[in-house]
């Protein structure tokens, strides 16, 4: 783990860091001026979401390092747990 990641985790107590996880599914869709990305990770049933201005290379089947925090989102009156990605990098 590099210094920047250690500093981020020390500063924000709710952040979680996962290394070398495999991406099962990666979806990209345009949402206003942003591109909404949804990533599903092996052995995890909760979606990981992040936004970017441009499309990102397809991560399906890749190993990644991801820093995220748990969050809830309301969809059609139901609360759904999601993981909001702060930083994502190829492993």
Image (tube, helix red, strand yellow):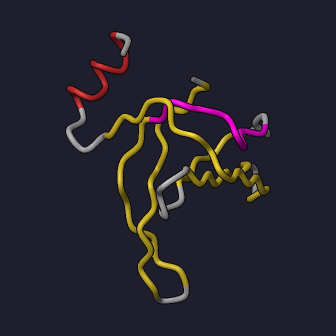
Depicted 73 relative to depicted 26: above or below: below
Give the residues in magenta. Answer: 58-66
Depicted 91 relative to depicted 78: above or below: above
**Whole-percent x and y of residue 49?**
56, 53
Q: Residue furthest top?
A: 3
Q: Quadrant of the N terminus?
A: top left
**Whole-percent x and y of residue 83?**
44, 54
**Whole-percent x and y of residue 88?**
55, 32
Q: Residue at x 27, y 29 (%)?
A: 9
Number of numbered markers:
0
Residue 80 vs residue 47: left or right? left
Q: Residue at x 40, y 35 (%)?
A: 18
24 or 27: nearer the eye? 24
Q: Residue at x 57, y 23 (%)?
A: 91
Residue 66 vs residue 9: left or right? right
**Whole-percent x and y of residue 24?**
65, 51
46 or 28: nearer the eye? 46
Q: Is residue 61 magenta?
A: yes
Q: Is residue 32 magenta?
A: no
Q: Residue furthest bottom?
A: 77
Depicted 89 relative to depicted 44: above or below: above
Residue 69 vs residue 56: left or right? left
Choose top left, top right, bottom left or bottom right for residue 56: top right
Q: Residue at x 38, y 11 (%)?
A: 2
43 or 57: nearer the eye? 43
Depicted 90 relative to depicted 12: above or below: above
Residue 24 vs residue 5: left or right? right
């Amino acid at each position: 783990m590099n210094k920047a990641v250690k500093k981020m985790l020390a500063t924000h107590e709710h952040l979680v860091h996962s290394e070398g996880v495999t991406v099962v599914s990666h979806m990209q869709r345009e949402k206003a001026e942003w591109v909404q990305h949804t990533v599903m990770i092996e052995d995890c049933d909760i979606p990981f979401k992040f936004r970017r201005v441009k499309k990102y290379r397809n991560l399906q089947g890749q190993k990644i390092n991801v820093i995220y925090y748990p969050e809830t989102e309301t969809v059609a009156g139901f609360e759904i747990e999601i993981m909001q990605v702060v930083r994502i990098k190829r492993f």
